[in-house]
Amino acid sequence: MTRYLIRSFKNLNFCDLLSNFRSNWFIPVSAIFFLLLNTGLATHNLWPVDSYYSFVPAAIMIFLFSFICPSFVTYQSHISTKVKIFALINAASICFVAWADLKRFVIFLHGNPAIQKLVFMFLAIPFVYVVNVLFWDKLGTVLNEAIQDFDIKKWEWVIYACIYLLFCIFIAFCFLKSQAFYGTKYLVDIIYTSDSPKLLKTNAFIIIDHIENDLRQPLFAVFAAPLMGIPSLLGKIIPGIPGALFIAFFQLVLLFFSQLLLAKALELNKRQRICFIILSSFTYTYILFSIMIDQYVIAFFWLVLTVYLMNKGDNNAAISSFASSGTLLTSSVLVPFILKPKENRFKTYKEWLINMLFYGFDFLILLLLSDRFHILWNSIKNLKMLSQYSDEKLRLSARFLQYFNFVSSYYFAPAALEKQLEDGHSSWQLAEATTLNYIGLVIFVLAILGFIATRKSMISRIAFGWLCFSIVILAIAGWGTNENGLILYALYFGWSFLVLNFNLVKVIENKLKTNLIIPVFTAITCIVMLAINVPGIISLVEFAINKYPV
């Protein structure tokens, strides 16, 4: 993006710039209405100072790109009609949800706020349509190529459809019986330390300036809205059922597709892939996140897509990393490895440093374009605020006790109990980790063995690096230990254990030259997981129904 700007300034003359703007003028004009509709300017009683220095740079940058970029009308001529229709519906959905979720609108001090918001909604659609066309043109191509790489037959899709339907029934039962998963008057800490009601109250998936879209996930809504626009709209317009149900159903689609991407990265055959999907579907983490609406599902999807493209050696990994880093900033740790040159020469390493520098500038430009400059401006204050999630007073040994409990909880339901929090509401929380979790330790050791056995495999190297990163973040830095809430990070970090564990079983099967090891391992592990996870989930759901019935 930065290089494109530099080239454009060098090569384009005034007539070219003016010609581009004549074609693209509607984009920045519409963008202004979208930013007013979607960000802090529309959600506060007064115009806060940080909205001034976020809104103005965003508007300037969008106007600048309208001069530099070729005609969008010409560009979209090669886009399929299906993509354009879908992008239009999705754009209208995003704008409608933004209109519906914003409770206050004081851009004008006189007149009817509802009519003002409605006018802004329609005027914002062209800009959001342009963004959706660009988004889905790129992502659609990547996903279509991935689906073709899967080479899945119809009968295999039937198996996966049955698993998906089973989970949909489970989700529907939970949501129709209890509001604990999406809509209590208490916004946080109902199920573990999740913020599901808070995320849904003023849709964090759509509203760029949502309070939860902070320094940790500065571009979360930017890369979540194109995915969640239509599910969010369905939740608004279909009466009689919880709107969050549609978001949960689509979260499940993202979870399932992420499983397929990991299976492809592991280079599994059809038999092994089916076992992998079934095994991962019965883990406690997968079951939990099917009913717990959280930002980590979106972040996990973008992370896995980036890992898949890295493993494939696809140049789109760098583009995907903007989404994975933007939806959860810690995922940016992969960027140096994505940009790392294959040749170990001084010249290539010099280029590597230059590429990372330009990547940083590109990310900053993306923040400016997305009206997120105040995230940068307040970064020091935000870092101090986020330090509350790490308990520096907790001994390192105690952090590792929580860590090995976290490793075990990826597969198996952890010990949990009902607690009364300070504000008086009931919460389902993890039991304190007072002793070493030997199951977690065994899983950890097996993951290390899996890496040693398959260390030449790119996906094993990535997974092992991610495992080490989880130790740094969760055990050494102690992120989340202050709340005893590491279960919340099981999806984001735990996949590395699954990949390495499964790779180890795959190596054993290949050594023994038999096709029985993986199916037998899957069957035994699933039986054990069901024996532990079903009672654990039942206890959680019973708590939700008894304490927070619909």
Image: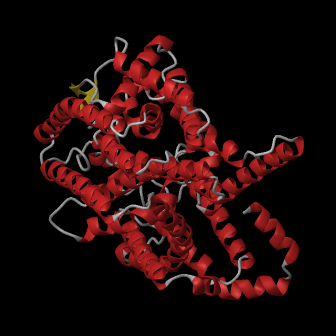
Residue 96 is situated, as x and y percent measured from the top left of the image, at 37, 72
Up-down relation of residue 542 to residue 300 (above or below): above
Which residue is nearer to you in this view: 142 or 387? 142
> Which residue sits at x=71%, y=77%?
69
Up-down relation of residue 37 to residue 432 (above or below): below
Residue 112 is situated, as x and y percent measured from the top left of the image, at 36, 76
Name the side, left or right, on which 136 lies relative to 341.
Answer: left
In the rendered image, is residue 46 in sight?
no
Up-down relation of residue 251 to residue 133 (above or below): above
Which residue is nearer to you in this view: 61 or 447? 447
> Which residue sits at x=51%, y=48%?
265
Name the side, left or right, on which 451 lies relative to 75.
Answer: left
How many numbered callouts?
0
Q: Residue furthest front?
A: 513
Name the side, left or right, on which 103 lies relative to 508.
Answer: left
Name the side, left or right, on which 112 lies relative to 532.
Answer: right
In the rendered image, is residue 544 in sight?
yes
The image quadrant that residue 235 belongs to is: bottom left
What scheme was used to colour the molecule?
Answer: secondary structure
Residue 216 is situated, as x and y percent measured from the top left of the image, at 53, 43
Up-down relation of residue 353 to residue 470 (above or below): below
Quarter of the image containing the N terminus? Answer: bottom right
Residue 406 is situated, as x and y percent measured from the top left of the image, at 39, 27
> Which residue sits at x=82%, y=40%?
344
